Amino acid sequence: MLGFKVSDRLQRVNGDEVAGMETLNQLLKKLALGQSVDVSVLRNGREQQLTLTLKEEF
């Protein structure tokens, strides 16, 4: 399955460390809809790289 899973722990967005929700919000504000984003997640004790495309919420 591609994308996030419920148990994933977000580590980095485009190489920038995500220390908490405030940091994540600041990083996301710099991005545009439709833009591809490289993220690192901790999944089952292992770091994995994902590439996601930002989409508008509905």
Image (cartoon, grey):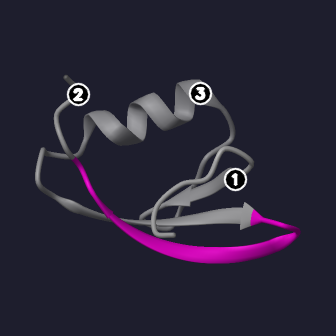
Seen in the picture, residue 41 relative to 25 is either above or below; the reply is: below
**Distance between mark 3 and mark 1 Cα atoms:** 15 Å
* Amino acid of disc 1: Asp
Q: Residues within 10 Å of mark 3 (few under 14, many from 20)?
A: few
Is residue 19 placed above or below 45 in the rendered structure?
Answer: above
Is 30 or 34 nearer to us in this picture?
34
Tag 2: residue type?
A: Glu
* Residue 3 locus on image (x, y percent): 46, 61
Q: Is residue 50 magenta?
A: yes
The residue pinned by badge 1 equals 8
Residue at screen point 19% across, 43% down: 55
Would you name the residue on which mark 3 appears? 21
Q: Is residue 31 left or right of residue 2?
A: left
Crowdedness near tag 1: few (<14), some (14–19) or many (≥20) residues, C-alpha within 10 Å? some
Is 36 positioned to the left or the right of 6 in the image? left
Q: Residue 24, percent across and down?
A: 50, 36
Task: Please state which of the two labelled residues, at mark 2 or mark 3, is closer to the viewer.
Answer: 2
Say which residue appears at 55% left-offset and 77% top-offset: 49
Where residue 37 appears, as percent x and y from the top left, is 32, 63
Residue 57 tag number: 2
Residue type highlighted by circle 3: Met
* Residue at 19%, 22% in the rendered image: 58
